[in-house]
Amino acid sequence: MRIRDICLAGALMFGLGMPTAFADALKIGFMNTFSGPGGALGGEQYDGFMLGIELAGSKLGGREVEVVKVDDQLKPDVARQLVDRLLKRDKVDIVVGITFSNILLTVAGPVTEAGKILVSTNAGPSPLAGAQCNPSLFVISYENGQAHSAVGEYLNRQGAKKVITLVPNYQAGKDALAGFKSTFKGEVVQELYSSLQQLDFTTELTAIRNAKPDAFWAFMPGGLGVALVKQVAEAKLQDVVPFYSSFTVDELSLPAVGDAALGALSPYPWSPELDNPANKKFVAAFKAKYGRTPSLGAMQGYDAAQLIESAVKATGGKIDRDVLIAGMREASFASPRGGFRFNNNHFPIQDWYMRVVEKGSDGGLRIVNKAKVFENLEDRFHQDCKMK
Amino acid sequence: MSATILLAQALNGLQLAMLLFLLAAGLTLVFGIMDLINLSHGTLYMMGGYFAATVFQVTGSFWLAMGTAVPLAFLLGVALELLLLRHTYRRSHLDQVMVTFGVMVFFEDLVKLLWGNASQRLATPTLLQGQVELMPGVVYPIYRLGVIALGIVVVVALYLFVQRTRLGMLIRAGASNRRMVSALGVNIDLLFTLVFGLGAALAGLAGAVVGPVSSVEPGMGNHALILSFVIIVVGGIGSIRGALVAALALGLIDTVGRALIAAALHEFLPPAMASGITPALASTLLYVMMAAVLVLRPSGLFPAPGR
Amino acid sequence: MSVTPVPGRLGSVRRLEITRLAGPAVLAAFAVLPVYAALSGDDYLLSVAARMLIWALAAVSLNLILGYGGMPSFGHAAFFGIGGYAVGVLSQHGIDNGFLQWGVAIAVSAVVALLIGALSLHSRGFYFIMITLAFAQLLYYLAQSAYGYGGDDGMTIARHSRLGGWIDLADRPQFYYLCLALLVAALVGTDRIVRSRFGRVLRGAASNDRRMQAIGFPTFRYRLTAFVISGTVAGLCGALLANDILFVSPSMMSWIRSGDLFAMVIIGGAGTLFGPLYGAVALLGLEELLMTWTEYWRLLFAPILIALVLGSPAGIDGLLGRRGGGPGRR
């Protein structure tokens, strides 16, 4: 028994110090939320990312790629530990991923301070777009408020004057509300907040029903959005108050929501129907590989892979942080969005559309483009960022 | 704070109380009769949800899902008892905590391996879909009313079972004095297995029932587990009546209490802050209640006689 | 082979020399580990080992009351939170002075331990578990509602605690050796306490409280003192954890963490000197090792845990040749 214990200790020491196989490959740590109510989003971004690598010949910029996939479980402390592991044990060169803003805010510091590049495929909290911008950080999706400013503008055009808002009580939720308010010209009569764990909106919906505003707008990501839309339909709230939402219903969650989603409007910087060669190629390849239409998250993951590929190619295969950063800033790749560039704060400048859930001619549900709301929209914070 | 919202929350509280009762009843029996601290009770709850979700996804029938989930949970409980837990009866409570903790941890990853990380889909049956207007302005989901009804049925059924059947009498006796029951020649091993199975079935039923209104996902049992323990401590170990009273108290505090706290905080705090603090503050109420009970009535509200 | 009365036992037990060396051997291995890590360039190993030391220290503190004192506290992780947030909150307000931060961590932990102990120590066994759990949950929810201090998301700490010119905690090897030194000090301290009169009263109260009271000892006072000492050391661990990853969040004080600590003490061997060290190394080491093999490492971890509990009532320390468990086991 004692010998066994000593051997166990020895094995531990050896096992922990073991070097990894691919010494020359480009190591990428893909961290995202793969579990819980937000779990589907992480999976979607991962699928898009891996497709991007595959279409580049399973290499990025001519280098072999090794992707280490980890689940942050929407817990900042878990994310913190995972990042530690990715940086020190797996010795990754680039960290990619992250759906939720609170996670990004926690890990951005450790990753960039360790001298590695972080590419966010979804989270885009406003502090990181402004004063806390960082040369090693790239956000390929959008600054949180951008999307919702499109909704505010759209509601102006619909003539809504009094609105009740509902967002989850975390950074992205607050960014969303701030973004919405930045363009919305009417009055927000009530600001409702829910928690990221909250799946029951009875109280909120009852309050809205009683208040009878011109419109009810909500930002509710992932599984939370699914729950909300279902409950709105169940309560037949749409008959009393028009319901607009951001990111509650997309290609991914539409099957789970079903008919309850009819009429739901959402802002997107892209849609699968956009008519440009890069998008056609992307959508076709995604459908072929995964058997479903890609959603926004998938496109963002795909663009992240393209971004890295373009930057590594520009360096001639060398993994040097500063050269990579320069390459990434160029962003010379064909995005399905139809043209892509970064602002000085490494957040995108892009168009915005309003999309709605309709019944197609075959009776099935589809999301279609309704209007282009903004062209080449910059986020509101880039002037606060000291980078050029 | 409008009356409609209060009423809606009171109903929510009642619904929550029924679910908590289903969980706590089994736990209190297991602890009371078998003197087993079972941290894997939350796992049985979770597995009930998974069994139901899987059957639902395969057959499309909610009722079939419910009908199979409960017996499956019962069998799982029996298997767990026979294969593992019966070896812990002679061990200290601390060792039981460790072993059942291990079971809990094992199943959490097992579920991720077999079903993946995402939530499982379990939809409300067409019969119970939609909302009903109980009073002008008070619209409440029918399904949740169904849960309340189910809870009442289970309470009555358990009462009749425990008070009017021979097996129930043995259970009551065992909760008071296990050794005497054994000395009287009852097959204690079989009794234990059945009791554990019953607890598992109730927990599994709770997990299945909660599926449509919540999410069936890994780790769904953790919070429920702690609440169950709080309930049996407050109610009194081994007492089903105590579990019911405590579950009602807890359910109402967690819903109505939460709404009242939210309203109060919103009066003088900015909305983001008020909403941020409310859940935590509401949860502390539960623990304050438990601590108070432990200080004033250390054996709980309705301790089984002989304890 | 020498036959020596084993301190901490009621009665004397034959000890084999190799088991007597196991504990110090493990400590020696920890002492030379940074050298190995520097040579092989394995930063990660150093990180993991530092965390093992901190958890071992916490387990040693829990062992005093759980293993020797018979007080199964299931809320010990709450003190992590107190210590961690003391560092975090002060840092957020610009106070980097380590002595001040850690002083506050220790002081607040002591006061809270005094309060919790005074209210809880009238309960025994399962009820003691539940009431300590309740208090820990209260603190957990308090941390979650800490608006402005991160709430549920936790908060990042900008800088390590500055300990004058003595030690630079930002330098990993220095931080590591500090943790090791504190652990050794705690082990020596535990040994001293256990062998002292105080310790004997404590252990006596754990096995038969009424008898000790009949003899004339105010056992409540002794148990409360031990509880406060234990909580204070755990609070210090919280400060160390905060410096380890420069991040604190409510999850560091969740009941699951308390459960982890509990497991380390029981698995290692409750009521033995080096038991908590074995437990911390075994559980954390096993976790790290299994994690490299599979994402679903708990499927392997749990059966091993269960087998250890069922197979060796005296924990790893028992496997190493000693017999019997500590007095506070039922």
Image (cartoon, coloured by chain):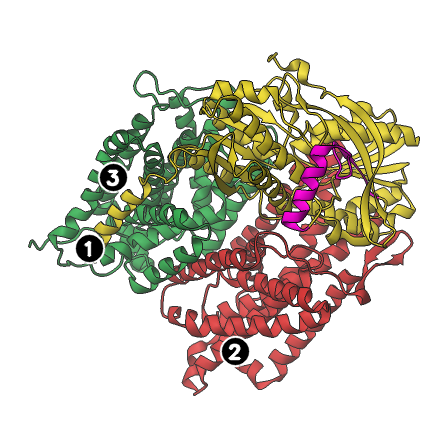
In this figure, which residue is indicated by the disc labeled 1?
Answer: A2
Q: Disc 2 marks which amino acid?
A: Leu
Based on the displayed image, in which of its 4 quarters is residue B231 positioned? Answer: bottom right
In this figure, which residue is indicated by the disc labeled 2?
Answer: B194
Chain B color in figure: red
In the depicted structure, whether residue C241 falls above or below residue B38: above
Q: Position of residue A84 (x, y in %)?
A: 44, 34
Q: Which is nearer the eye, B276 or C7?
A: B276
In this figure, which residue is indicated by the disc labeled 3?
Answer: C189
In the depicted structure, whether residue B108 falls above or below residue C250: below
Disc 2: CA contacts within 10 A as few (<14), some (14-19) or many (>=20): some
The magenta-colored residue range is A264-291
Based on the displayed image, in which of its 4 quarters is residue A196 positioned? Answer: top right
The answer to whether dots 2 and 1 both sit on one chain is no
Residue A288 inside the magenta-drawn segment: yes
Disc 3: CA contacts within 10 A as few (<14), some (14-19) or many (>=20): few
Q: Position of residue A198 (x, y in %)?
A: 68, 46
Q: Chain of mark 2?
A: B
The answer to whether dots 1 and 3 both sit on one chain is no
Give the number of the disc on residue C68.
none
In screen coordinates, is B105 left or right of C44? right
Q: Residue at x 36, y 39 (%)?
A: A20
Q: Residue at x 69, y 33 (%)?
A: A278
For mark 3, give the secondary structure.
Answer: helix
Name the front one of labels 1 and 3: 1
Q: Chain of mark 1?
A: A
Q: Position of residue C92 (x, y in %)?
A: 52, 23
In screen coordinates, is C254 left or right of B132? left
Chain C color in figure: green
